[in-house]
Amino acid sequence: MPSSPVRWAFTARNGTQTRVRLAPRVQADVAAAVHAMTLAGAGVAVLPDFMVEADLAAGRLEHLLPTQRLPEGSFHAVYAGPQAPAKVRAFIEHLRQSMAAGEAGIG
């Protein structure tokens, strides 16, 4: 999701940028809540592809501005202690490899 929910910067395929300022009536910082509100008709949202694939295919949601891109997001692995447990390290490595190969559906 964009860093500011009321200012979005879109980039067209030709590199032209357009900045949009929204006046939201409702907002949330949890993707599942944003998804639920969007399905309920609360308005537009920026959500990860994997979260909306089924809704797009079923016609419950519509992809707006398909020729425009928003800045790509990121996420972080957070764990207690100076070093992650072996299971967590394995999961992080799996995510790295999956995203590098384009298998995670991110981007």
Image (cartoon, helix red, strand yellow):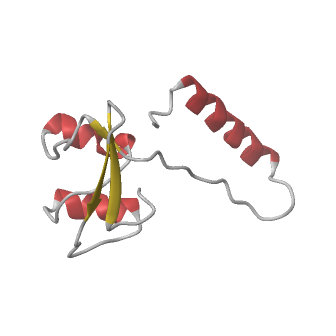
Specify whether 40 is left or right of 13: left
* Res 42 quadrant in image: bottom left
Q: Answer left or right for 90 relative to 11.
A: right
**Residue at the far bottom in the pictured view:** 25
Relative image position of residue 94 (x, y in whole percent) = 66, 34
Location of residue 69 with respect to 79 vertically, above or below: above
Q: Position of residue 23 (x, y in %)?
A: 22, 72
Residue at x 33%, y 57% (from the top left corner): 8
* Residue 87, x across and y down, in percent: 75, 45
* Quadrant occupied by the C terminus: top left
Above or below, 75 against 5 in this view is above
**In the image, residue 71 above or below residue 79:** above
Q: At 44% from the left edge and 47% from the top edge, which residue is drawn?
A: 71
Residue 53 x/y as whole percent? 29, 38
Rendered image quadrant of residue 98: top right
Is 41 positioned to the left or the right of 88 in the image?
left
Which quarter of the picture shows residue 39? bottom left
Q: Residue at x 51, y 26 (%)?
A: 102
Quadrant location, the N terminus: bottom left
